[in-house]
Amino acid sequence: MPRRAVVLQFAKGRCVIASHSWRGPGRFDDRMETFSPLARAIAGTAADLAPRARFATAGLELGEAFVWTMGLLGVGIVALLLSSISAGAASLGITLAAHLLFVLILMFAALPWFRGKTATLDPRAISAALLP
């Protein structure tokens, strides 16, 4: 049973409307037959009210997750250097940080392959693959 959700992103937050309702642990009521018309109506109305708005499918893209991983790796390198210098093992810390920095450089080199184009969504013609 596919569970889908519509995510409405606003300037100060977001609203998630799910296609199922929770009945208990592991049990959901499938409401897809009423969810699809609701989601299509919301998307169509939003397109009418904001004609210059850009619509896309929700979710974390691979490129964005890759950039977050690179950022966390950079923070880890700095933390490793600071902790090793403060512990008196600067040479070991610099060696380990150099290895991690090499991995970070390789990740920067691979970044263009992970950045895909975000597929825009026409809110008036949502495909049956997204909403049956």
Image (cartoon, rainbow, N blue to C red):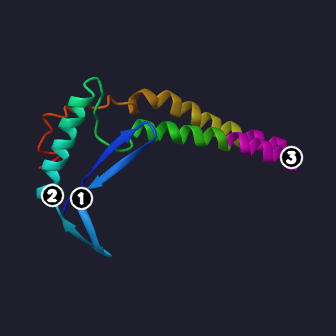
Residue furthest to the right in view is 88
Indicate the quadrant containing the N terminus: top left, top right, bottom left or bottom right: bottom left
Q: Amino acid at mark 1?
A: Arg
Residue marked by disc 1: 3
Name the residue: 19% across, 31% down.
Answer: 122
Name the residue: 50% across, 36% down.
Answer: 67
Question: Relative to 41, is 58 on the left or the right?
Answer: right
- Image quadrant where residue 127 sits: top left
Question: Relative to 109, is 102 on the left or the right?
Answer: right
Q: Main secondary structure of the magenta part?
A: helix
Q: Secondary structure at mark 2?
A: helix
Frontmost of labels 1 and 2 is 2
Q: Amino acid at mark 2?
A: Met
Measured from the top left, where is residue 117 in percent x and y?
32, 28
Residue marked by disc 2: 32
Q: Amino acid at mark 3?
A: Ser
